[in-house]
Amino acid sequence: MSRQKIITVLLSVVFIIGIVILINSIGDAEPNFLRTLDETPEVFERNISQVSYQASHLADTSAVFRPAQIRFYDNHVYLNDFSDFTIYEYDFEGNQKRVLTTNRGRGPGEILHLTDFDINDDVIYVADSQSMRVTSYSIETGENIDTFSLENRPMRVTCLKDGFIVQWLGNDLLFSKFDYDGNEILQFGEIVEDQYQHQMSLDGTIRSNRNDRFVYIPFYSSLIYHYESSGELINILKAPDGVHFPFTRREGATAFAPDFSYMRDGYLDENNNLYVYTSIPGDDNQPSEESLISYLDKYNLRTAEYVESIRLHDHYTSVMYNPNDHVIYASDMGFSFKYILDSPF
Protein backbone atom coordinates (compact mmCIF):
# COMPACT_ATOMS: atom_id res chain seq x y z
CA MET A 1 0.00 0.00 0.00
CA SER A 2 1.34 3.40 -0.94
CA ARG A 3 2.11 6.06 1.59
CA GLN A 4 -0.68 8.22 0.23
CA LYS A 5 -3.23 5.45 0.65
CA ILE A 6 -2.03 4.80 4.21
CA ILE A 7 -2.43 8.48 5.07
CA THR A 8 -5.92 8.47 3.50
CA VAL A 9 -6.97 5.41 5.55
CA LEU A 10 -5.58 6.93 8.77
CA LEU A 11 -7.39 10.20 8.14
CA SER A 12 -10.63 8.29 7.48
CA VAL A 13 -10.24 6.37 10.76
CA VAL A 14 -9.55 9.59 12.67
CA PHE A 15 -12.59 11.21 11.04
CA ILE A 16 -14.87 8.29 11.95
CA ILE A 17 -13.58 8.25 15.56
CA GLY A 18 -14.21 11.99 15.78
CA ILE A 19 -17.77 11.58 14.57
CA VAL A 20 -18.38 8.81 17.13
CA ILE A 21 -16.96 10.96 19.94
CA LEU A 22 -19.12 13.90 18.83
CA ILE A 23 -22.27 11.76 18.76
CA ASN A 24 -21.49 10.34 22.18
CA SER A 25 -20.84 13.78 23.61
CA ILE A 26 -24.15 15.01 22.25
CA GLY A 27 -25.89 11.95 23.65
CA ASP A 28 -24.26 12.51 27.06
CA ALA A 29 -25.57 16.05 27.03
CA GLU A 30 -29.13 14.84 26.56
CA PRO A 31 -31.18 14.77 29.82
CA ASN A 32 -31.59 11.34 31.36
CA PHE A 33 -35.39 11.22 31.25
CA LEU A 34 -38.20 10.38 28.85
CA ARG A 35 -39.52 12.99 26.47
CA THR A 36 -43.15 13.85 27.10
CA LEU A 37 -45.41 14.47 24.10
CA ASP A 38 -47.32 17.50 25.38
CA GLU A 39 -46.06 19.34 28.48
CA THR A 40 -42.80 19.32 30.39
CA PRO A 41 -42.51 19.60 34.20
CA GLU A 42 -41.41 22.82 35.87
CA VAL A 43 -40.08 23.68 39.32
CA PHE A 44 -41.99 26.27 41.38
CA GLU A 45 -42.63 27.05 45.05
CA ARG A 46 -45.42 25.49 47.05
CA ASN A 47 -47.96 27.78 48.69
CA ILE A 48 -48.17 26.27 52.20
CA SER A 49 -51.59 26.72 53.83
CA GLN A 50 -51.77 27.74 57.48
CA VAL A 51 -54.57 25.26 58.13
CA SER A 52 -53.87 23.23 61.25
CA TYR A 53 -55.26 19.81 62.13
CA GLN A 54 -55.78 17.39 64.97
CA ALA A 55 -54.61 13.81 64.45
CA SER A 56 -56.24 10.65 65.76
CA HIS A 57 -56.44 6.96 64.88
CA LEU A 58 -59.17 6.23 62.37
CA ALA A 59 -60.17 2.97 64.01
CA ASP A 60 -58.87 -0.08 65.78
CA THR A 61 -56.99 -1.53 62.84
CA SER A 62 -55.04 -4.13 64.81
CA ALA A 63 -56.63 -6.82 62.61
CA VAL A 64 -55.27 -5.08 59.50
CA PHE A 65 -51.75 -6.41 59.04
CA ARG A 66 -50.67 -4.14 56.17
CA PRO A 67 -53.06 -1.20 55.55
CA ALA A 68 -52.53 -0.01 52.00
CA GLN A 69 -55.07 1.80 49.81
CA ILE A 70 -57.75 3.91 51.46
CA ARG A 71 -60.92 5.09 49.69
CA PHE A 72 -64.22 6.60 50.76
CA TYR A 73 -67.67 6.24 49.28
CA ASP A 74 -71.19 7.10 50.48
CA ASN A 75 -70.17 8.15 54.02
CA HIS A 76 -67.88 5.17 54.52
CA VAL A 77 -64.13 4.61 54.43
CA TYR A 78 -62.70 1.48 52.78
CA LEU A 79 -59.26 0.15 53.63
CA ASN A 80 -57.38 -2.61 51.81
CA ASP A 81 -55.17 -5.00 53.78
CA PHE A 82 -52.34 -5.75 51.36
CA SER A 83 -51.35 -8.92 53.23
CA ASP A 84 -54.50 -10.88 52.36
CA PHE A 85 -56.48 -8.45 50.13
CA THR A 86 -59.30 -8.10 52.63
CA ILE A 87 -61.24 -4.81 52.35
CA TYR A 88 -62.58 -3.28 55.58
CA GLU A 89 -65.48 -0.83 55.73
CA TYR A 90 -65.67 1.89 58.43
CA ASP A 91 -68.05 4.76 59.02
CA PHE A 92 -66.57 8.24 59.35
CA GLU A 93 -66.44 7.81 63.12
CA GLY A 94 -64.11 4.83 62.75
CA ASN A 95 -66.60 2.07 63.57
CA GLN A 96 -66.04 -1.10 61.54
CA LYS A 97 -69.16 -2.03 59.60
CA ARG A 98 -68.36 -4.79 57.12
CA VAL A 99 -65.49 -6.91 55.89
CA LEU A 100 -65.06 -8.10 52.32
CA THR A 101 -62.85 -11.18 52.31
CA THR A 102 -61.37 -12.17 48.96
CA ASN A 103 -60.10 -15.73 48.57
CA ARG A 104 -56.78 -16.37 46.88
CA GLY A 105 -56.91 -18.30 43.64
CA ARG A 106 -57.86 -18.22 39.97
CA GLY A 107 -61.52 -19.19 40.31
CA PRO A 108 -64.49 -16.81 39.97
CA GLY A 109 -64.32 -14.15 42.65
CA GLU A 110 -60.81 -15.16 43.74
CA ILE A 111 -57.80 -12.83 43.77
CA LEU A 112 -54.10 -13.41 43.18
CA HIS A 113 -52.72 -9.87 43.48
CA LEU A 114 -54.92 -6.86 44.24
CA THR A 115 -53.27 -3.71 42.90
CA ASP A 116 -56.19 -1.26 43.12
CA PHE A 117 -59.91 -0.98 43.81
CA ASP A 118 -62.74 1.52 43.34
CA ILE A 119 -66.46 1.66 44.13
CA ASN A 120 -69.53 2.54 42.07
CA ASP A 121 -73.25 1.95 42.77
CA ASP A 122 -72.51 -0.20 45.85
CA VAL A 123 -70.16 -2.44 43.86
CA ILE A 124 -66.41 -2.78 44.48
CA TYR A 125 -64.21 -3.27 41.40
CA VAL A 126 -60.82 -4.89 42.02
CA ALA A 127 -57.82 -4.87 39.64
CA ASP A 128 -55.93 -8.19 39.82
CA SER A 129 -52.69 -7.73 37.90
CA GLN A 130 -51.46 -11.30 38.29
CA SER A 131 -54.57 -13.06 37.01
CA MET A 132 -55.17 -10.25 34.45
CA ARG A 133 -58.75 -9.65 35.58
CA VAL A 134 -61.11 -7.08 37.03
CA THR A 135 -63.45 -8.64 39.59
CA SER A 136 -66.52 -7.03 41.15
CA TYR A 137 -68.29 -7.67 44.45
CA SER A 138 -71.43 -6.46 46.19
CA ILE A 139 -70.65 -4.17 49.11
CA GLU A 140 -73.77 -5.32 50.95
CA THR A 141 -73.31 -9.09 50.66
CA GLY A 142 -69.67 -9.49 49.65
CA GLU A 143 -70.73 -11.87 46.87
CA ASN A 144 -68.86 -11.98 43.58
CA ILE A 145 -70.84 -10.28 40.79
CA ASP A 146 -68.57 -10.47 37.72
CA THR A 147 -65.07 -11.55 36.78
CA PHE A 148 -63.74 -9.96 33.58
CA SER A 149 -60.70 -11.60 31.95
CA LEU A 150 -58.45 -9.09 30.18
CA GLU A 151 -55.69 -9.31 27.57
CA ASN A 152 -53.08 -7.37 29.59
CA ARG A 153 -52.21 -6.69 33.22
CA PRO A 154 -54.51 -4.13 34.89
CA MET A 155 -52.52 -2.10 37.43
CA ARG A 156 -55.20 0.45 38.39
CA VAL A 157 -58.95 0.83 38.07
CA THR A 158 -61.36 3.72 38.56
CA CYS A 159 -65.12 3.96 37.99
CA LEU A 160 -67.12 6.37 35.85
CA LYS A 161 -70.88 6.63 35.37
CA ASP A 162 -70.90 4.63 32.14
CA GLY A 163 -67.95 2.28 32.67
CA PHE A 164 -64.59 1.77 34.31
CA ILE A 165 -61.08 2.81 33.29
CA VAL A 166 -58.13 0.42 33.52
CA GLN A 167 -54.50 1.48 33.55
CA TRP A 168 -52.31 -1.15 31.91
CA LEU A 169 -48.88 -2.57 32.46
CA GLY A 170 -47.40 -3.75 29.17
CA ASN A 171 -49.61 -2.20 26.50
CA ASP A 172 -48.94 0.32 23.73
CA LEU A 173 -51.56 2.70 25.14
CA LEU A 174 -51.83 3.41 28.85
CA PHE A 175 -55.62 3.15 29.37
CA SER A 176 -58.72 1.27 28.25
CA LYS A 177 -62.36 2.00 28.98
CA PHE A 178 -64.84 -0.85 29.56
CA ASP A 179 -68.58 -0.82 30.01
CA TYR A 180 -70.03 -2.54 33.07
CA ASP A 181 -70.61 -5.71 31.06
CA GLY A 182 -66.84 -6.02 30.60
CA ASN A 183 -66.76 -4.95 26.93
CA GLU A 184 -63.77 -2.83 25.93
CA ILE A 185 -64.96 0.45 24.39
CA LEU A 186 -61.70 2.22 23.55
CA GLN A 187 -57.95 2.39 24.18
CA PHE A 188 -56.07 5.67 24.60
CA GLY A 189 -53.27 7.38 26.51
CA GLU A 190 -50.00 8.19 24.75
CA ILE A 191 -47.83 10.13 27.21
CA VAL A 192 -44.13 9.81 26.31
CA GLU A 193 -41.93 8.79 23.39
CA ASP A 194 -41.08 5.08 23.13
CA GLN A 195 -43.90 4.41 25.57
CA TYR A 196 -44.07 0.64 25.23
CA GLN A 197 -40.40 0.34 26.18
CA HIS A 198 -40.91 2.34 29.37
CA GLN A 199 -44.17 1.05 30.84
CA MET A 200 -42.58 0.59 34.28
CA SER A 201 -41.86 4.32 34.38
CA LEU A 202 -45.52 5.19 33.78
CA ASP A 203 -46.95 3.59 36.92
CA GLY A 204 -49.26 5.84 38.89
CA THR A 205 -52.81 6.07 40.13
CA ILE A 206 -56.08 6.94 38.35
CA ARG A 207 -58.92 8.59 40.24
CA SER A 208 -62.32 9.73 38.90
CA ASN A 209 -65.20 11.96 39.91
CA ARG A 210 -67.35 8.79 39.44
CA ASN A 211 -69.17 10.56 36.65
CA ASP A 212 -67.50 11.81 33.47
CA ARG A 213 -63.82 12.60 34.15
CA PHE A 214 -60.70 11.09 35.65
CA VAL A 215 -57.06 11.96 36.30
CA TYR A 216 -53.85 10.03 35.86
CA ILE A 217 -51.33 10.89 38.60
CA PRO A 218 -47.87 9.45 37.81
CA PHE A 219 -45.74 8.07 40.61
CA TYR A 220 -42.56 9.41 39.02
CA SER A 221 -43.36 12.74 37.37
CA SER A 222 -44.70 16.21 38.18
CA LEU A 223 -47.42 16.14 35.54
CA ILE A 224 -51.09 15.26 36.11
CA TYR A 225 -53.28 14.28 33.13
CA HIS A 226 -57.00 15.19 33.19
CA TYR A 227 -59.27 13.18 30.83
CA GLU A 228 -62.87 13.11 29.66
CA SER A 229 -64.66 9.75 29.90
CA SER A 230 -64.38 9.65 26.09
CA GLY A 231 -60.59 9.46 26.41
CA GLU A 232 -60.05 13.05 25.27
CA LEU A 233 -57.33 14.90 27.15
CA ILE A 234 -58.82 18.00 28.82
CA ASN A 235 -55.63 19.53 30.23
CA ILE A 236 -52.33 18.76 31.94
CA LEU A 237 -51.58 20.11 35.39
CA LYS A 238 -48.04 20.86 36.57
CA ALA A 239 -46.99 19.89 40.09
CA PRO A 240 -44.43 22.03 41.95
CA ASP A 241 -41.34 19.82 41.99
CA GLY A 242 -40.39 19.56 38.31
CA VAL A 243 -39.72 15.81 38.27
CA HIS A 244 -39.51 14.18 34.81
CA PHE A 245 -40.49 10.65 33.78
CA PRO A 246 -37.35 8.50 34.23
CA PHE A 247 -36.10 5.79 31.92
CA THR A 248 -37.05 2.19 32.70
CA ARG A 249 -33.88 0.41 33.77
CA ARG A 250 -33.25 -2.92 32.06
CA GLU A 251 -30.95 -5.86 32.70
CA GLY A 252 -31.29 -8.25 29.80
CA ALA A 253 -34.95 -9.09 29.34
CA THR A 254 -35.88 -7.84 32.83
CA ALA A 255 -37.30 -4.33 33.34
CA PHE A 256 -37.14 -2.54 36.68
CA ALA A 257 -39.34 0.27 37.96
CA PRO A 258 -37.57 3.45 39.14
CA ASP A 259 -36.38 3.31 42.73
CA PHE A 260 -38.40 6.23 44.04
CA SER A 261 -42.16 6.84 43.87
CA TYR A 262 -42.98 10.55 43.72
CA MET A 263 -46.77 10.96 43.83
CA ARG A 264 -49.09 8.54 45.60
CA ASP A 265 -52.82 9.23 45.58
CA GLY A 266 -55.59 11.66 44.68
CA TYR A 267 -59.22 12.65 45.12
CA LEU A 268 -61.58 14.71 42.91
CA ASP A 269 -64.37 16.66 44.59
CA GLU A 270 -67.62 17.95 43.08
CA ASN A 271 -66.20 21.48 42.73
CA ASN A 272 -63.49 20.51 40.24
CA ASN A 273 -60.75 20.44 42.83
CA LEU A 274 -58.09 17.74 42.89
CA TYR A 275 -56.22 16.79 46.06
CA VAL A 276 -52.97 14.87 45.56
CA TYR A 277 -50.85 13.28 48.24
CA THR A 278 -47.19 13.78 47.33
CA SER A 279 -44.00 12.53 48.95
CA ILE A 280 -40.57 13.81 47.93
CA PRO A 281 -37.01 13.45 49.22
CA GLY A 282 -35.92 15.83 51.96
CA ASP A 283 -32.81 17.98 52.17
CA ASP A 284 -30.41 15.05 51.86
CA ASN A 285 -32.04 14.20 48.50
CA GLN A 286 -32.08 10.50 49.30
CA PRO A 287 -35.26 8.52 48.53
CA SER A 288 -35.45 6.72 51.89
CA GLU A 289 -38.51 6.42 54.12
CA GLU A 290 -36.79 8.54 56.79
CA SER A 291 -36.01 11.45 54.47
CA LEU A 292 -39.41 11.82 52.76
CA ILE A 293 -41.41 15.04 53.06
CA SER A 294 -45.18 14.75 52.52
CA TYR A 295 -47.77 17.22 51.27
CA LEU A 296 -51.42 17.30 50.35
CA ASP A 297 -51.48 19.46 47.20
CA LYS A 298 -54.64 21.12 45.90
CA TYR A 299 -55.32 21.88 42.20
CA ASN A 300 -58.11 23.50 40.19
CA LEU A 301 -58.95 21.03 37.42
CA ARG A 302 -60.80 23.50 35.20
CA THR A 303 -57.99 26.06 35.08
CA ALA A 304 -55.23 23.41 35.36
CA GLU A 305 -53.61 25.44 38.14
CA TYR A 306 -51.90 24.48 41.38
CA VAL A 307 -53.58 26.22 44.37
CA GLU A 308 -51.94 25.41 47.72
CA SER A 309 -50.58 22.66 49.98
CA ILE A 310 -50.78 21.30 53.50
CA ARG A 311 -47.53 19.98 54.97
CA LEU A 312 -47.92 16.52 56.51
CA HIS A 313 -45.37 15.29 59.03
CA ASP A 314 -45.49 11.58 58.34
CA HIS A 315 -45.16 9.27 55.34
CA TYR A 316 -48.14 7.20 54.11
CA THR A 317 -49.03 4.66 51.46
CA SER A 318 -52.41 6.27 50.69
CA VAL A 319 -54.17 9.53 51.56
CA MET A 320 -57.71 10.75 50.83
CA TYR A 321 -59.19 14.16 51.67
CA ASN A 322 -62.91 14.55 52.37
CA PRO A 323 -63.72 18.22 51.61
CA ASN A 324 -67.25 17.91 52.98
CA ASP A 325 -66.07 17.08 56.51
CA HIS A 326 -62.60 18.69 56.19
CA VAL A 327 -60.93 15.43 57.21
CA ILE A 328 -57.79 13.78 55.81
CA TYR A 329 -57.80 9.96 55.91
CA ALA A 330 -54.41 8.28 55.72
CA SER A 331 -52.98 4.78 55.95
CA ASP A 332 -49.50 3.34 56.20
CA MET A 333 -48.17 -0.17 56.68
CA GLY A 334 -48.97 -0.12 60.39
CA PHE A 335 -51.90 2.18 61.17
CA SER A 336 -54.72 4.25 59.72
CA PHE A 337 -55.38 7.82 60.78
CA LYS A 338 -57.67 10.76 60.33
CA TYR A 339 -56.73 14.42 60.54
CA ILE A 340 -59.49 16.87 61.38
CA LEU A 341 -58.77 20.28 59.86
CA ASP A 342 -59.70 23.43 61.79
CA SER A 343 -60.89 25.13 58.58
CA PRO A 344 -61.65 24.20 54.94
CA PHE A 345 -58.71 23.51 52.65
Image (cartoon, rainbow, N blue to C red):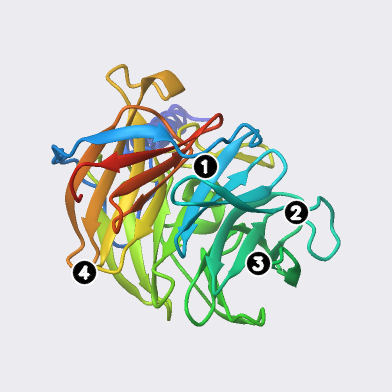
Residue shown at 34%/32% (left/top)?
A: 55
Q: Residue at x 44, y 47 (%)?
A: 93
* Disc nearer the start of the sequence (3/2): 2
The Cα–Cα distance between marks 1 and 4, rounded to whole angstroms, is: 32 Å
N-term-proximal mark, 1 vs 4: 1
> Picture coordinates of residue 106 (x, y %)?
84, 58
Instruction: Give amino acid for label 2.
Output: Thr
Q: Which dot, 4 or 2, sits closer to the camera?
A: 2
Marks 4 and 2, how far apart in space?
A: 38 Å
Say what secondary structure mark 1 lies in.
loop
Q: Which mark is residue 139?
A: none
Quarter of the image with the N terminus in it: top right
Mark 2 or mark 1, whichever is nearer to me: 2
Q: Depth-wise, is mark 1 or mark 4 nearer the camera? A: 4
Q: Residue at x 81, y 50 (%)?
A: 104
* In this rendering, the label closer to the viewer, 1 or 3: 3
Mark carried by residue 140:
3
The quarter holding residue 170 reads bottom right
Q: Is tag 4's residue or tag 2's residue first in the polypeptide sequence?
A: 2
Q: Amino acid at mark 1?
A: Thr
